[in-house]
Amino acid sequence: MSEISYLIPVTIIAYLVMMVLIGVWFTGKNKNVGDFYLGGRKLGPLVTAMSAEASDMSSWLLMGLPGVAYLTGGAEAGWTAIGLAVGTYLNWLILAKRLRVYSQKINAITVPDFISNRYHDNSKVLMGVSALIILIFFVPYTASGFSACGKLFGTLFGWDYHVAMVASAVIIILYTCSGGFLAASFTDLIQSIVMTIALISIIIFGVKEAGGFTAVLDNASSIPGYFSLTNIHNTATGGADKYSALTIASLLAWGLGYFGMPHVILRFMAIEDKNKIKTSRRIATVWVIISMAVAISIGFIGNLLSKNGTVEQLEDSEKIIIKIAMYMGEHGTGLAIIAGLVFAGILACTMSTSDSQLLAASSSMSENILKGVFKIKMGNWMSMFSARAVLVVIAVLGVVLAWNENSSVFRVVSFAWAGFGATFGPVMLTALFWKRSTKFGAIAGMVVGGVMVFVWKFKIAALGGVFAIYELLPAFVAALFTIIVVSMLTPAPDPSVINEFEEVKKELHE
């Protein structure tokens, strides 16, 4: 039996077993739903930083981003990465500390909790709308992760896509249901380490097999529009297409999405000490910049490896890292084990995002819709049971949506990212920094942002030209404008809301 036939599966299985055991370990740490959904606000700076970024990157980092770079070069992947790097830093700088203080002040353990409690919305309309938005966009987001797992095992072992996808979902459900937020956060820390090992291993091996950095750069430079930030390689014509300033701006707009990512900003609410957020910000920003740069480089390397026949030419470019790792695993025991870690890293990307998304979606349904909007009374045991049951139901919906194996991980994540960025981003910014904003403005902004994402994506962008931009940018602007206008046209917030805002502001400067 060859190394690749048993060492890679053994490495992956060992990794999966470890994730489940971590979930079981943290089961006893969940005394109530506050622990299950927010870990009792006990996360240290390292776990906060790395779990936030691991849950953010998803399978997009190891499959989607290299796949885009492999096909079209540096423009789309590069400007997207720059936008995300800037967005990561600004999110930690602007939102993190203020949200940590404010969320504890108003006793919020979920994003819908925060938005509703911030405006003292006793009608729970804000809570219901925001929880519904989370469900709408998180289910397909989670589905994209399950799809990535199916593609991984299908390509690696020839397993049926659907069997592999369902099996992966079951593993994620097991440890997330068991350990809740703490399990998700600590497994995310481990997963970020595995992801880093995967990226570094692939780039070192890939460069060696490609003949060195010079060969990779020469190949990229020889392809029209490939090694450029102002042109993009057109795979259909073999030529180069100009990248306009508007297109670049729309890709940079990916960074705006961070202000509205529930699974990321929940980490801000969970950190133990608000004064350690600066440390978390530095760790998170450095890791994001390096990991995305390496991921894009893997796409460049993969292009040359396909061209020289080392790996096959791919119709599905998102599988390039899988193909390189499989080739690596054929070169001895040590490299087979490292290849196993690479595949575990791809799983880590998926699992670290899926577990956080499942928790956020579960909390929205159980805590915010069932208990908040419909006022169903539950004791502590029933609340915990409901949280886990809803999590399983949402995961099943994700499996159903992921049934089509031809779906693009990058495109699905792109749409869901726009949805969260446009609905929650403007609301979070105005809720935290503008005391004159009202609940009516918040409701209108979320609805307009969500609707605009769909309208722009499926109607307006089809017109082409200046309209063919990433839907997040126009939807974000429309939502922010709506919040400002509606807030100014509706009665000022109650004095108790204003006083609470000022108390938080004062505490931040203590």
Image (cartoon, rainbow, N blue to C red):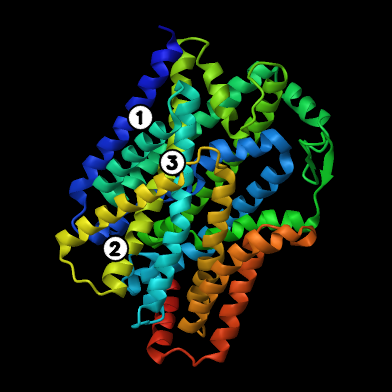
**What amino acid type should be assigned to the residue bearing mark 2?**
Ser
Q: Where 183 falls versus 34 (above or below)?
A: above
Q: Where 180 falls versus 478 (above or below)?
A: above
**What amino acid type should be assigned to the residue bearing mark 1?**
Tyr
Mark toward the viewer: 1 or 2: 2
Residue in the image at 28% along x and 74% along y: 374
Regarding residue 192, the answer to whether it shows in the image is no
Q: Earlier in the sequence, mark 2 or mark 3?
A: 3
Q: Where 288 falls versus 2 (above or below)?
A: below
Q: Earlier in the sequence, mark 1 or mark 2?
A: 1
Q: Is residue 202 left or right of residue 507?
A: right
Q: Is residue 114 left or right of residue 458?
A: left
Residue in the image at 47% along x and 51% along y: 140
Mark toward the viewer: 3 or 1: 3
Q: Position of residue 12 (x, y in %)?
A: 38, 26
Tell me which corner region of the image, top left, top right, bottom left or bottom right, holds residue 454: bottom right
Q: Position of residue 264 (x, y in %)?
A: 45, 55
Q: Is residue 108 left or right of residue 468?
A: left
Q: Which mark is residue 366?
A: 2
In the image, 63 versus 401, the foreground residue is 401
Locate the N terminus and report the quarter of the image it occupies. Answer: top left
Q: Which mark is residue 15?
A: 1
Q: Position of residue 309 (x, y in %)?
A: 68, 16
User: SS at mark 1?
Assistant: helix
Regarding residue 324, the answer to whether it shows in the image is yes
Residue occupying the far top of the picture: 1
Tell me which corner region of the image, top left, top right, bottom left or bottom right, holds residue 123: bottom left
